Image (cartoon, rainbow, N blue to C red):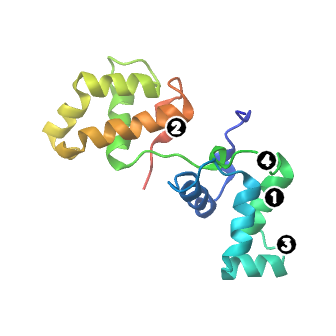
Amino acid sequence: MKLPIDVATRVSAKLSRLIDSMVNDPDRDEPPTLDEVRKMLERSGSAHAAQSTLHPQDRGSALAEIRELIEEYGGEVLAHHFVAAKAGEGLSRIIETAAADRNLPRAPTLARVRQAMVEGLTARLAGDGTIDPDEDATLLAEIDELIHRHGPDAVAEDFIRFE
């Protein structure tokens, strides 16, 4: 089920990282649900989890946050929808360059940025010293993963990581 809004923008970075680690756990057979994330947090025994069990009004804890998400969206919703996906530093530079390129459409999609990468954008930026030349395969794998998760028509600029 694709949720109608970008719910990942409403999730804290801490919870997003936690969910992402569960989603990408190679030992998992099935993708985790929000309810499974909640159960894992409750079992973790962390100070934050224990504190929010004692103080359910603590909105700053990951456990309180996941409980709110379950209340709003339901426990059976797949957790990967709540991972805030951002490109890494190298891919962010490629996306920024593609967005500024007059030869590409305004607000290029992930698929269009990937096409530009294959057509030489990555090599040009590596030659300029903007990105590491050894990252070519890694960058393609990274954009392929974003395309897999968010679709080829997603606006690429939405995934730029500002640090």
- Tell me the element at label 2: helix
Disc 2 residue type (three-letter): Asp
Badge 1 or badge 4: first in the primary sequence: 1
The local secondary structure at tag 4 comes to: loop
Q: Give the residue pinned by disc 1.
A: 68
| Residue underneath mark 4 | 76
Report helix, strand or loop for mark 1: helix
State which mark lies toward you, 1 or 4: 4
Q: Does label 2 or label 3 sit earlier along the sequence?
A: 3
Dot 3 lies on which element? loop
Tell me, yes or no, whether the two marked residues, 1 and 3, touch with CB atoms within 8 Å. Answer: no
Q: Position of residue 1 (x, y in %)?
A: 72, 33
What residue does disc 2 label?
A: 158
Q: Is residue 127 left or right of residue 52?
A: left
Q: CA distance from mark 3 to mark 4?
A: 23 Å
CB-based contact (under 8 Å), mark 2 and mark 3: no
Amino acid tagged 1: Glu
Q: Is residue 93 visible?
A: no
The residue identified by callout 3 is: 57
What residue type is disc 4 on? Glu
Are the two marked residues, 1 and 4, in contact with CB atoms closer than 8 angstroms? no
How far apart are the two marked residues, 2 and 3, measured between alpha carbons?
32 Å
- Residue at 81 percent across and 46 percent down: it is 73
- The numbered mark, 3 or 4, whose residue comes first in the sequence reads 3
In the image, residue 96 sits, relative to residue 12, either above or below, namely: above
Q: Pick the residue in front: 68 or 141.
A: 141
Along the polypeptide, which appears first: circle 1 or circle 3?
Answer: 3
Which x, y percent locates residue 40?
69, 67
Choose mark 2 or mark 1, whichever is in front: 1
